[in-house]
Amino acid sequence: MSNRVLTTIAALAALAAAPAFAADYTFKVAHTNAAGEVQDMGLQKMKELLEAKTDGAATLEIYAGGQLGDEQQTVEGVMLGSLDMGMTSNAMLSNYVEDYKVFDLPFLFPTIPALGEKVDANWDMMEASANGSGFQLLAVFSSGIRHLMTSKPVESIDDLAGMKIRTMQNPVHVEAFRAYGANPTPMSYSELYGALQSGVVDGAEGASTGYDGMKFYEVAPDFALVGWLNMTAPVTMKKDTFDALPAEVQTALMEAGSEAAAWQRQYVVDQEQPLLDSFKEHGVNITTPDTAPFIEASQPLYESQLTTEGQKALFEALTK
């Protein structure tokens, strides 16, 4: 046998014995916010960090604007494993992870940094709650402080009497706006622009980022700074899917999620005032109702909506 053949055989044997290159991991992640909104920017940052931590072996494929379904379909896709990863409002996820109903309570956190500190300090408890419902919690982004967008000015809580206000499909949100005197009308986010335009609803609750990103000011030109909710946007995977990943990919996902969340929450804070200033350029009428009556009306919810030991324990941990 020639030396050339022997060399070729040796080379092939060495190649077969060499460790395989790390497999590529592309995680499809869906959400319903517009591309470029603060939640989407958080996922873009997470993608950048994940690629850096894995030398490009793992990445996110982001589907914004409800391309893969509404929020309920997103959560259920993650549960079924047909979707690798989802980011939804906490209001939707808490229908599946019951302990997270705590984050749906009004006026719980005064600022986004304050919320972030409590989330980070109680991560283990929050992760355990998610795991118990079959999810792996990767990050907790901010969806901003939520206010009111309406077709007529809201100067006080009394102005909400009888108004049809779109809420998320979440019982805590519905009860909150019933307590404020409104007629809460749950509906999908994708239906909201048309509902405002046609008068099916008189207004909606939402953050300045969404008001801007979806151009709701075109159909709801009044914006009342109530700050009724400090909304979170958890990023989750199916726990079984996460557990099946190599340890180094799991670590990279968790680190990228944590670092992206810290970056994204500060990004939301930085965007608030410039957005409010831009609304005036669109002819938006901004009002500042007294929030004391809203806060007072919210108090009974703290008792009526926390019904399980897990919810009560998480509430105590977050508010102590």
Image (tube, grey):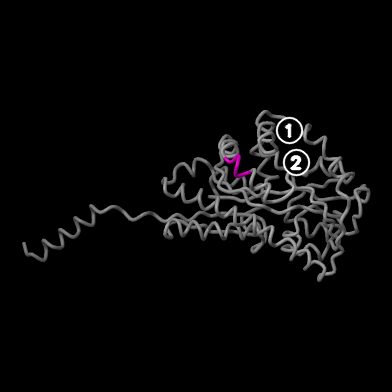
Q: CA distance from mark 1 to mark 2?
A: 9 Å
Lower sequence index among marks 1 and 2: 2
Q: Which mark is residue 105?
A: 2
Q: Position of residue 65 (x, y in %)?
A: 66, 59
Q: Residues within 10 Å of mark 1 (few under 14, many from 20)?
A: many
Q: Quarter of the image for the C terminus: give it.
A: top right
Q: Position of residue 182 (x, y in %)?
A: 88, 46
Q: Which mark is residue 243?
A: none
Residue 171 vs residue 264: left or right?
right
275 versus 19 height, above or below: below
Q: Is residue 120 magenta?
A: yes
Q: Which residues are magenta?
A: 119-123
Q: Which mark is residue 306?
A: 1
| Quarter where residue 169 is shown | top right
66 versus 118 height, above or below: below
Q: Main secondary structure of the magenta part?
A: helix
Residue nearer the viewer, 203 or 256: 256
Q: Residue furthest left?
A: 1
Q: Is residue 14 magenta?
A: no
SS assignment at label 2: loop
